[in-house]
Amino acid sequence: MDKLQTINFLWKKCGRNLQRNCQNGVQRLLSHPVPLKRCISDFRIPTEIQVCKRPPLKVFTAQYSTVSELSPAEYEEIADETLDSLTEAFEDLPERLECHPEYDTGYSSGVLTVKVSPEWGTYVINKQSPNKQIWFSSPKSGPKRFDFIGGKWIYSHSGEILHELLTDEISKAIGHSVDFTRYSYGKR
């Protein structure tokens, strides 16, 4: 089965609701240089229509849809509350724990920057209102775009939750356990 036949097969099998979830994977499949079976298992296809024998690296479901059902006003309120809460958390860290002398935070116009140390780098977390997302740039894990799904900010490509990712990375960065899941929209 060549790539075009595979794409047509998958597109028909996905059905209307899942076609949006498969669209990014189909675009990747068209330009992917690796063998077809490996490529198919790497993108979001419901388990029942996997065409290769090898299990997928990660299985994604419709719950990670990137289509946000929030109104623009709801998005703004939730994103502002999330960023305000995270700003407060980052500003309180040096008061509670020993941080690098150059640790610094700043929040302005929907953009939160956190310089952990010169060695570790700077985090940037910002609202992306047209997409109804929060964008996250990490010096360790790179850029990610989080959608508000089920009361949490979720990275649709991996299922990572913003607050859990922050908890993990910032704890490692400052050498102390920090819990960001207790702030707005961080609970499971």
Image: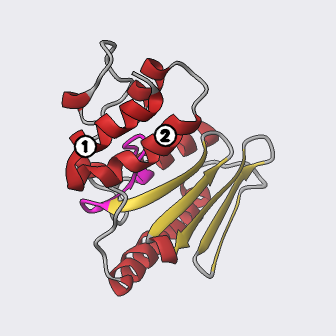
Q: Is residue 152 magenta?
A: yes
Q: Residue at x 47, y 70 (%)?
A: 131
Q: On the rendered structure, is 58 left or right of 130?
A: left
Q: Amino acid at mark 1?
A: Lys
Quadrant into which the N terminus falls: top left
Q: Amino acid at mark 2?
A: Asp
Horizontal and vertical percent position of residue 87? 54, 68
- Viewer-side label of 1, 2: 1
SS category of the residue bearing label 2: helix
Q: On the rendered structure, is 99 left or right of 180?
A: right
Q: On the rendered structure, is 174 left or right of 155?
A: right
Residue under label 2, please give it: 168
Horizontal and vertical percent position of residue 43? 41, 35
The image shows residue 146, relative to residue 110, as above or below, that is above
Neighbour class for label 2 at 10 Å: few (<14), some, many (≥20)?
some
The image shows residue 72, relative to residue 95, as above or below, that is below
Residue under label 1, please give it: 12
- Residue 71 or residue 48, whichever sits in front: 48
Q: Residue at x 57, y 21 (%)?
A: 34
Q: Residue at x 41, y 76 (%)?
A: 81
Horizontal and vertical percent position of residue 162? 44, 52
SS category of the residue bearing label 1: helix
Magenta segment: 149-163
